[in-house]
Amino acid sequence: MTHLILQPVAALMLLTLLVWFVMYARRLRFIIANRIALHEFVSPETLNAVLPEDVNRPSNNLKNLFELPVLFYAICIVLAVAQQADPLSIGLAWAYVALRAIHSAIHCTVNIVMLRFTAYVLSSIVLWIMVVRFVSLVY
């Protein structure tokens, strides 16, 4: 059963890949349509200053997917290796991934801040529960 904790890990990796594809598709479409010369942009900040908000949103979301999810990855991998994943851990992991997917969908599309914030807070609560459970296993 412990290997089941790796399924939500793989799902979050696939979500990250999807957001990455969306980011590049939007950027390339905008750059080509507006005949922007990429050699003029020496940093991500200079490029982001030219791109409209709807083109930049997937990039911002991709950055989010490399912040708190790092804790998620670490916890799940250690639980799998130590064979300590129980049904509650697996359920929490899937809940975290589902809420991150909702957050990403909102962020990359309609970007209604309160909806996005709600998904973020709920996913963070799930993650902090996972952290507390993990720490209680260690000590």
Image (tube, grey):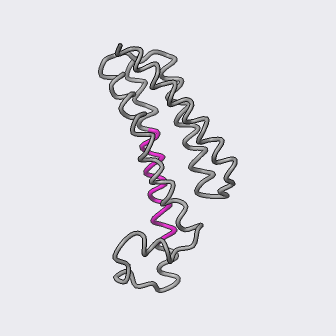
Nearer to me, 63 or 12 = 63
- Displayed quadrant of residue 109: bottom right
Asked if 77 appears above or below 117 in the picture, the reply is: above
Magenta residues span 11-27
Q: Main secondary structure of the magenta part?
A: helix
Locate residue 55, reporting x and y percent: 55, 68
Nearer to me, 3 or 36 = 36
Asked if 56 appears above or below 118 in the picture, the reply is: below
Q: Is residue 104 left or right of residue 68?
A: right
Residue at x 39%, y 14% (from the top left corner) = 137
Residue at x 69%, y 48% (from the top left corner) = 114
Residue at x 44%, y 57% (from the top left corner) = 20
Q: Name, please, the residue furthest toward the left.
A: 81
Asked if 55 appears above or below 135 in the picture, the reply is: below
Locate residue 19, reporting x and y percent: 49, 54
Locate residue 124, reporting x and y percent: 54, 35
Nearer to me, 111 or 124 = 124
The N terminus lies in quadrant? top left
Q: Is residue 18 magenta?
A: yes
The C terminus lies in quadrant? top left
Locate residue 74, reporting x and y percent: 35, 32
Residue at x 55%, y 61% (from the top left corner) = 57
Q: How many marks?
A: 0
Q: Is residue 15 magenta?
A: yes
Q: Is residue 22 left or right of residue 71?
A: right
